[in-house]
Amino acid sequence: MIPKMRQVELRAYWRKLKAFVKTLSLQRQMMENLIIAKARQDALQRKMEERRLRLQEEANRRFSASGAEEQEQRILYTNVLEYEQDHDWPKLWKANMKKNPDDVTLVSGLVSYLLSRADHPVVKLLRKHQYRVYNRLYPIVSKGLVQSPPRPLTPSRSTHLPHPEKKTTRGSSVGGQSFSTASYLSPSLSHDHSTNYEDEVEEELHSQATVDRENSFEDLEQFLTQLDWAPLHSSTEDSEGTCDPSLQPEQDEGSLQELEMRALTEHLKAVVKDIHIAIDQLLSLCLLSFECLNTANSKDLCLASIEEAFFTPLWSALVALFRRVYREREQAFETSMKLYQDVSPGDVGVPSKLFPEDSDAQQGSYPYESAVQELKLLLKDCCPQRKLECIVRTLRLICACAEDYRCLHDVDSTPKTAAIGADDLLPILSFVALRCQCPQLVSECAALEEFIHEGYLIGEEGYCLTSMQSALAYVESLQPEQLPAHKLV
Amino acid sequence: MAAGGAGGKTYSFKVVLLGEGCVGKTSMVLRYCENKFNDKHITTLQASFLTKKLNITGKRVNLAIWDTAGQERFHALGPIYYRDSNGAVLVYDVTDEDSFQKVKNWVKELRKMLGNDICLCIVGNKIDLDKDRHVSVEDAESYAESVGAKHYHTSAKLNKGIEELFLDLCKRMMETAQAEERLKGNGASQSASSRRGVQIVDDEPQATPAGGCCSSG
C-alpha cells in the first residue's frame, strides 16, 4: 500500500516538476527573445547612426569638391590636354586601342607606359600625392627609427605630430611642445625637406602644380632605401634630452602614452583616408585622360597599376606607422612565437591525420614548411594586392600539403571525399603563423585590411585575409602552459 | 550594409557556415557544391571557401560560402567573418543536444552584429540517424520561428534537403536585396568608392571582438 501511495505522490511531484521546468524554459526563451530584440534595436540604431555619418561625410566631400576640388580637377584636365598637344604618344595609343578593343595586353601596356612618363599630369599628380603622404609619415617614422621599437614610449615622443604649421587641436592637446620641424628632422635632410614642405603648403594654397616635384621625390626614394638597411639618424637625441621620462610620475606617463596612442591611431586613420582619396583621384584622372580605359576590366587593371606605383615606394614607411599603432599586438605575437617556436602541429590542435607522424625524423624540415616559406615572402612585396595574393597562395599551399599528408595516412583505405574545412584550416594556419616568426605580419595584415578592394572582400582573397587575421589573433592570445591542444578544446 | 545586388542582374551573396566540429557542415557544403557535370567547383581552398553560380528565376546569383571554425578558441575574431554576410547557415547534429545549444549562441551573436539584414537558416543535419535523435523537431522549429529563422532538416550522407535549403536561402536573400534596393530608390548607384568611405569611418575590426566573445556557453 505504502509503496503505491509513494508512487502516486512521486508522480504528482514529477508532474509538478515537469510543469515547472516548462515554465522555466518558456521564461528563459522569453528573456532571450527580449535580449535579442533589444540587441536588434541597438544594432539598427547604430547602423542608422553610421549611415548618417557616412552620408554626411560624403556630402561634405561633394560640397567641398564642387568648389576647390572641382576646380583642381579642371586644372588637371587642362594640363592633360596641354600635354597631349605637345606629345603624340597618347594619340597613337588611343588609335591603337580603338583598332584592337579586345587586346588586354594593350591596356596594361598603355598604363605602364603612361606611368613611365614622368612629365604626364597623371604621374605628376601621383608624385604629389605620394609626397604628401610621405610627408605625413616621415616625422613619425623617422622618430620610430631612432629608438628600437620595444622600448616604452617616452612623453617627449608625443610631440611628433604631422603638419606642425597647422597645429591641430589634437596636436596641442597631446604635447603642445616643440613643434619646430627641425627638431625631428635629421640635419642632412631637414633643409630639403622643409623647403619642399613649404612648397607643398604653397601649392595647396594655390592649388596649382607649378613646382617640379622630382627632386624631392628622389629624396624620398633615397630615404626609403636607407630605411630598409639601417637607421638613418643618430643625431636626433636632442629632443629626447629635454624631458627625462624617469622624472615624470608614472601615472602621467601612462596617460600620456594613452594620449599618444590615441593620436597615433587618429593619425593613421587620417593617412589611410588620404591614401584612398588620392587613389580615387588618380584613377579618375587616368580615366579622364584615356577614356578608352573606362571599361570594367581595364579599370581594374588601371587601378592595380596605379596602386602598385603608389604603394611601392611608400610601403615601408606606411607599415612603420602601422607597426607603431599595433605594437602591443605585435609584442603579444612575439611572446607566443618565442614560447612555442618548436611547437608541433598537434599542439595547436591540428588533427593527427593532417601531418606526418615522423616529423622529427625528417631532418631539417617540418610539416607545412612550404606554406611557411611562402608566407615569409609577404614582407618582401610592397603592394597590397601582391601581398594579398601571397596570403592566398599560402592558404592554397596549406590545403595542398594537408591533402598530401592525409593521403600518406590513408594508403590502404580508399581516398576519402572529405576535404579541409575551416575547422582544420585555422589550426594549421596558426601553426604556420607561429613558425613564420614574423610579428610584423600583424601590422601587415591590419594594413591590408584597410586597402583591400571592395570587390575582393567577399571572395577568396577576403576569406584568406580574414582567416589569417583570425589565426594571428589566436596566436597572440596564447598563454604560457596553454598548449598542448588537449587542454584547450 | 549587406547590399548584395550588383548593378546589373547578378547578385553576389556571402553566406557564412557555422556549426560545431562534428555536425557535418563540411560534408554538407561539399555535397552542395559538387556538381554532377563538373567537379571543378571545389576551389583550391577545398571546403573552407566555396563558390557557386546559380540562376534563379532568370537572375544570376554568385554565392560565396565561407566556412568558419567551430572551435571556441577561434571565436574572438568571429565577427570579422560575419561582416557583410547576406545569409548564415547554422548547422547542428540532431543526435547532439550540445550542438543545438551552440547554434543558439551563434544566432544571438549574429543578430547582435548584423540585425535583421541577415537571413538565418537553422539546419538539423544527420536525419539518417533519426533513431538517435536528441533534439526534438518541435523544439527546433519553434526556436527557429522565435528568432526569425527558417528551419531545415538535411542528411549530407544521403544528400537530402541540401539543395532545397540553399535554393530557399538564395530566394530569401534576393528578396531582402530587392527590398533594400527599393528602399534606396535611386540610391542603387552607390558606388564602390563611396563604400570605401565607409570602410575608413567604421573601425569594425578593432571594435567588434569585444562584443564577440560572449558566445562561449
Image (cartoon, coloured by chain):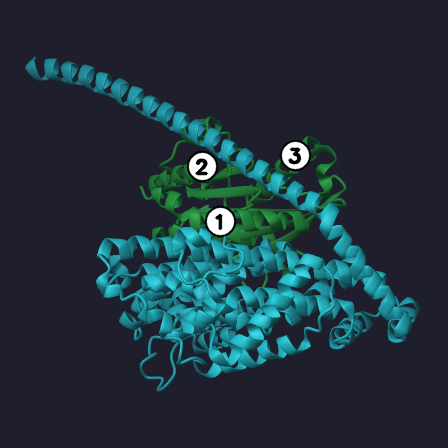
Which circle's residue, 1 or 2, is located before the other in the chain? 2
Assess whether mark 2 and mark 1 are in contact (beta carbons under 8 angstroms). Answer: no
Which one of the lettered chains is coloured cyan?
Answer: A
Most distant residue in the bottom direction: A363
Packing grade of label 2 (10 A; few <14, some 14-19, many >=20) is: many
Q: Nearer the viewer, residue A358 or A49?
A: A49
Can you see residue A47? yes
Query: Residue A325, position in %: x, y?
Result: 42, 60
Where is A460 relative to A108, above or below? above
Q: Which residue is depicted at the point 47% across and 77% down?
A: A186
Residue labelled with disc 3: B180
Tag 3: amino acid? Glu
Tags 3 and 2 on a common chain = yes
Q: Which residue is depicted at the point 30% across and 21% down?
A: A22
Classify residue B214 by image quadrant: top left
- Relative horizontal placement of residue B5, taking residue B49 as reference (left or right): right
Residue labelled with disc 1: B203
Query: Residue A239, position in %: x, y?
Result: 37, 70
Choose mark 1 or mark 2, whichever is in front. 1
Q: Secondary structure at mark 2?
A: helix
Which circle's residue, 3 or 1, is located before the other in the chain? 3
Classify residue A261 by image quadrant: bottom left
Residue labelled with disc 2: B112
Which circle's residue, 3 or 2, is located before the other in the chain? 2
Packing grade of label 1 (10 A; few <14, some 14-19, many >=20) is: few
Chain letter of disc 1 in the image:
B
From the image, which quarter does the N terminus of chain A lie in? top left
Which one of the lettered chains is coloured green?
Answer: B
Classify residue A231 by image quadrant: bottom left
Chain letter of disc 3 in the image:
B
Q: Which residue is depicted at the point 58% across and 76% down?
A: A192
Query: Residue A8, position in %: x, y?
Result: 16, 14
